[in-house]
Amino acid sequence: MDFCCKNLKKHVISHYNNANGLHNDQEHAHQIFQSSVMSALINGVYEGNITYGELSLHGDFGLGTFNDLDGEMVAIDGKFFQLRSNGSATEVDPSQKTPFAMVTYFKGEIQHEITSPMDSRQLKGLIDSLVLSKNLFYAIRIDGEFYCVETRTVSIQSAPFKPLTEVAKEEKIFGFSELRGTLAGFRSPDYSQGISVAGYHLHFIDDEQKRGGHVLDFKINRGIVRIDTFSSVYIALPETEAFENARLGADNGSAIKEAEG
Ligand SMILES: [Zn+2]
């Protein structure tokens, strides 16, 4: 069965259920859909069983990674990109799988124009002032002209997997300057560290859709910030032996900070 047919079948099932009064059409649910948890990724659970074809039924916007940690994922406007450590950016094949991703259908309910240069700390402060509460989740999209963006991209790993804190020490760091592009990601509450990345987790792709990665730092000249608020997060845990056997404690906060910057 090809990808389109598979999609069609899911639509049919979803509408059938709606006809029976059961609302499970994830496509229109105002929620974040997440595969696995950050604690698992930090502990080297780099194999998930959800495909990008399935993931794309739950959102057109988001971030994540790939099985075997083969690069960073960023999704905007329904297009999913794989940013690899060799600097390439390619569209994701629906059959590829992810061990961690967060997606949603992005609307951009809150909008704010940036008219003067800001560094990442100032911009995060601005977003903090625009959002309702630090206890909710937010999807954040920033389109604009960037003075600079510093990103990192994880490299493909092979079993036995090293934890992400060790992989992160060897990762490729890229510096881009004077370019247009999009930052896409989430602001998660402090209490969610381990489920997600507490605070800001942003990925970048340039307007030419050729360069990007997990964002470490940036300065923006001008642009537009758009934000959506979420009080609902759906987490699909991996149905894999590696996940079932992983030792996932509550003490991963410093490791996540170290690995995710
Ligand atoms: Zn990331």
Image (cartoon, rainbow, N blue to C red):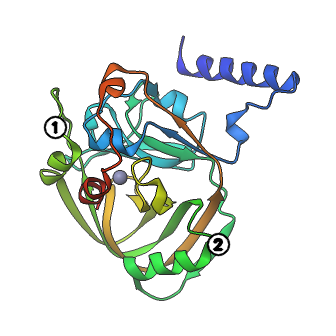
Q: Residue at x 61, y 17 (%)?
A: 5
- Residue 149 percent coordinates (x, y): 31, 69
Residue annotated with mark 2? 111
- Residue 253 percent coordinates (x, y): 32, 56
Amino acid beneath label 2: Gln
Q: Residue at x 28, y 61 (%)?
A: 151
Residue sitting nearer the eye, 46 or 243: 243
Residue with the most extreme front position? 250
Mark 2, Cα crowd under 10 Å, few <14 / some 14-19 / many 20+, is some
Q: Is residue 253 above or below residue 28?
A: below
- Label 1, secondary structure: give it: loop
- Label 2, secondary structure: give it: strand
Q: Residue at x 50, y 67 (%)?
A: 142
Check the picture and name the quadrant holding the C terminus.
bottom left
Q: Is residue 135 visible?
A: yes
Amino acid beneath label 1: Lys
Lower sequence index among marks 1 and 2: 2
Q: Which marked residue is nearer to the observer: mark 1 or mark 2? A: 1
Q: Is residue 145 above or below residue 90?
A: below
Label 2, ligand 1: CB separation under 8 Å: no
Residue sitting nearer the eye, 95 or 36: 36
Report which quarter residue 229 is drawn in.
Answer: bottom right
- Residue 24 percent coordinates (x, y): 73, 30
Residue annotated with mark 1? 162
Total numbered labels: 2
Residue sitting nearer the eye, 216 or 223: 216
Q: Is residue 159 left or right of residue 132?
A: left
Residue sitting nearer the eye, 106 or 124: 124
Mark 1, Cα crowd under 10 Å, few <14 / some 14-19 / many 20+, is some
